[in-house]
Every structure is written in C-alpha cells, then in structure tokens.
Amino acid sequence: MIHSADDIVRGSTVHADICIVGGGPAGIVLALELAKTGRSILLLESGGEAPTERARALNMGEIAEGSLHSPPDTYRQRVLGGGTSIWGGRCVPFDPIDFEARRWIDHSGWPIGYDEVERHYAAANAWCEAGEYEYDARLAVPNGMRALLRGFSPLHFDTNGIERFSCPTDFGSRYKDRLRSTPNLRVLLPATATRLRAARDGSRIEALDVCNGRDTTFSAVADQFVLAMGGMETPRLLLTSDDVHAGGIGNANDLVGRFYMCHVAGTIGSLRVNGAADTVWHGYDLAADGTYCRRRIALRPATQASMGLSNAVFRLHHPRIADPAHGTGPLSAIFLAQRFISYEYAKRVVSDVPLSAGTWLRHGLNAALDSPSTARFLLHWVKARILADRKFPSIIVRPRTNLFSLDFHAEQAPNPDSRIGLGSALDRFGNRQLRVDWRYCRQDVETVAKSFDLLGRELADQAIGQLTLAAGERDIETVVRRDGAYGGHHIGTARMGATARSGVVDRHGKVFGLNNLHIAGSAVFPTSSQANPTLTIVAMAVRLAEHLGTRVTGVPSIQESVH
C-alpha cells in the first residue's frame, strides 16, 4: 500500500514490525523481500513519486574542496526509486579479491567472504533486470562476444569480464504496483526521518521522528529499524541523533562518516590501434534475452598483489569529443549540443574550458561534412535510446580512424580522513546539512598511473597499438583531480567490521551496541571495488532480508495511534 504521509495526524505513532528508511533500491528490495515473511513492513521515503525542488533542497550541503566533488544535491534523488531514477544501469559484481584483507591496502578486508554475497547475485541481477547472471564474455552471448582487440592476450589484464546493463530499471516505477498491492507493506510518501530516538540505556532504538511534506511531525515505532538512505544521508542521520549517544549513534569509535569512498574515474590517454577497423570492437553485444553486454580490460588479482595496486578496469572509449581533430560528425554534434546533455555525462565527455570560435567552427564543419554519419547516429539514438524500453546504454561512435581514448574506473583505497560530516547550515527541519570532505591518497594515483603504463607496454609488445598521454596528462594526479570523486557512488561511511573498533556495523549490518538497528546499502561496504555499487547493494539487501526474516518477533500488522 502506498499512502500519503501528509494525511498522518500530528503527534501520531505509526507501528510496524520492521521500519525501513529510504525508498531506493536497497529499501524497496528489503521491503518486498521481508513482506514475504508476513510481518508488517513500513517503508518511509523522503520524496514522492516524482522529484520536487523542495525535496531536493534537503540534499544540499557544503563541500570542503569544490573542485574535487560535485555538490551533494547533484546526483542524489529524494524520490521513490532513489538513485535508480537517474542511473545508467551498469551492473557488475564485485571480485573475490575485494573482500580480502590485502596487506598492501590499509583498512581493507570484509568480515564476510565473497561467497556470502555471490550467492545473492543471481537474485540481484533479476531485481535489476540485467538478464542472466553470467559475467564471462565467452558464455554471456551465444557463440561468445566479439573480441575487444583482436589478437590481444595480455598477461596482466583480463578481457573476458563484462558489464551487463539494466533497462535501466527505475525501481520506483518498476515495483510501484507491487508496493501498492502488498497488504502487509505500507509506504509513506513524503516522509523524512529527522532523528533516531534511542532508549536511555542506548541499547535499542525506541522510535523514529518523521516529518511529512507539510512539516507535520509523527513517530514510527518498530521491533527493527533499517536505514537504507545512501552513503551520505545515513551518516548524517546517525550523527544528528546524539541525544543519548554522544557524538551520534554508532559513533563510539569516531567511525561514522569516515572512510568515504567514491571511485577514481575519468578518461585518459589516446590509443591508436594498428590494423583495419574490424580489428577492434568497443561497442555492445546482445545476450539472448536482449541485455546489452560489454567487455572491459580488468587488472588481474595476481598483478594487483604483486604490484601493490587497487582494483581497476579500463574501457575503450571514443576519442576526445572536445578536440575537432577526430573529424567525426556525431562527436562534433554532441559537442555542439553539450548544453542539452545531462550534468554527469557532460562533465565527462565535453570540455568546460573556454574554446575559440575556430574550434566551434571546425566542429560545425565536422557535423556538416560527415552529415550521413551524424544522421545515422541521431536516428539510432532516438530509436534505441529515447523510444526503447531497454535503452542503448551509452554513446558508441566508431571513429573515422582507429583512434580511441580510455575510460578508467578504479577502486579508491579506504581513507579515514575522507569523510561525511555535519556542516553549519540547517535544513528546513532544523538539522545540520552535510559537509563533504572527499580525499584521495597516493595509492589511488599510483593505481591509475601504473595500470596505464602496464597496459601500454602490453599493447606495444603485442603490436596491438600505441597508448600515449597528452601533455597535460603526464602528471596522473592532475587527471585524478580533474575528474575527482565519481558521480553518485557514495561508499563506506558506516562500514562493516569484525568488531566495533573496525566498523560501525557487524557482518549482518547491525549497528554495534544496538540490538534493533541495521544499515543497508553501500554505506556498509568496507572497500569500493572497481565495480559500480548498485548490483552489490541489491545483493546485500537480499542477504539482509534473509537475515532479518529470522529475527523479527511481533504481530504482523501495521497500526497507527494518536496521542
């Protein structure tokens, strides 16, 4: 059932067996999985079924260094479906090495093994609508996927790993009917959690303060509470809730908000591939079920260990759009239309450096002289992206020469000085806004630099092509700083640990020291992997639902009382 929180009477108390805060993919999956147990489930989402400026304003905050991190309201969505309302759909599982305590990466290691998450990936793949759970290029597509670079057999990289793409599925729209028709599940919109109320002895959460769209306050009481609010909002609520727990709930060891990770990502270098055009394939293959799949160039675990590197992957990308020397009509058309491109994509594919009138003219000539290619690209984009239910994942343009750039997507090493905290400004409920202090470390830079050099040597040794850096990229740290923290991947701010000294939550996501508060989502990830987090967020939500389903006691009903 989906109800308007605006109908709740001031001072009321809403009761349920399990209260989940946050209507993104983790919250929605948890709610629907737990509803199968017959228990009463309450799902609170701060936004509505569509975005509003009033809800977005609650995401605002301050950035310690604005050149390194986007404003905190840029990628986050307070809406049913959360971040999946704007995601690109990329689904990739974590690797076994990501869960290991690696001697060369401080603060690495999960208190659970890869197998405990891997067994839930098939279910996560289904929830994300990313097709079959198969991430080997030799098996994902009938007769195998096309080779990325024909004849390339690298020693230090694997080219058989793939990424699969969701529709992309907006969990709010896709699962709204199931949320609405499940009798023991109540969804309240808009309902913003403003404070957790702990018992006097601090051992459990007794109630949750909530405000609706009219700023009317009410309470939620449950046997178990789960925060599924994302890597930024989760620490904010924990730190705000300091009435009983000095410094915030779960923060006895000053870990809440620390170890904030995104990914170190961007576009780097130029790769000129030897041979004919058909020696390289940087596009997508279709699985039998219609899922788009794409190969990547992944750093092998043995090489990570021997060279002391974090996990990292490269993707073959079209040449730099801002440079008209590529002579390719579709790329110049994208450059000319950059004001109409989404913030995240525009940030990565076009230049924000002022360019001369001559550059704009050359782009215009490219688009005109290569007009047949431009027209074909636009027609394909309308049919396969705008009008299609399963959308073509990204811009794929065959350059007129075998000249490409590389996208890199690397794990960020856990860093306790990179953190989410509380700022000085207040939101409309009187709570302090976020303060983001994202920091990278030397290992992050070295992972990109050494991986790039290693790939360049292997390509040259096998006569596949020449990988070079532009003059402004020779200091890799400038490349890392140029792109900064990548997009909406907010990870690690309530990390999972074996003990309270190493984590905010235990192996099941329960906050240390409290017996009825759990956290779901990427906030609990101790490391970030090379992979986009959504698939693992969903897999971990399925795992948590399995665990909570055996813990909850109480009457399977949702009640509301007025005091």
Image (spheres, grey):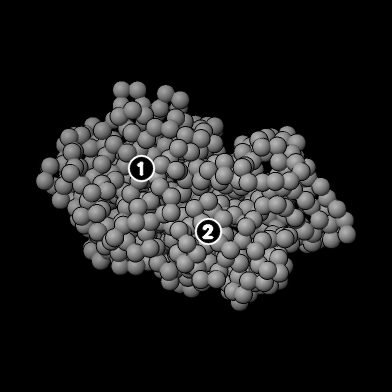
- Quarter of the figure with the N terminus: top right
Gap between marks 2 and 1 measured at Cα: 52 Å
Q: Residue at x 66, y 37 (%)?
A: 37
In the picture of the structure, the residue carrying the numbered disc 1 is 329
> Taking 454 as reference, is 485 above or below it?
below
Disc 2 and disc 1 in contact, CB within 8 angstroms:
no
Residue 242, given in percent of the width and then of the height, sits at 65, 72
Q: Nearer the viewer, residue 160 or 508?
A: 508
Q: Which residue is drawn at 51% across and 72% down?
A: 254
| Number of the front mark, 2 or 1 | 2
Disc 2, SS: loop
Q: Residue at x 33, y 49 (%)?
A: 97
Q: Nearer the viewer, residue 225 or 384?
A: 225
Amino acid of disc 2: Val
- Quarter of the figure with the C terminus: bottom right
Q: Nearer the viewer, residue 416 or 330?
A: 416
Asked if residue 382 shows in the view, the reply is: no
Residue 505's mark?
A: 2
Amino acid of disc 1: Gly
Residue 69, given in percent of the width and then of the height, sits at 46, 65
Left or right relative to 86: residue 58? right
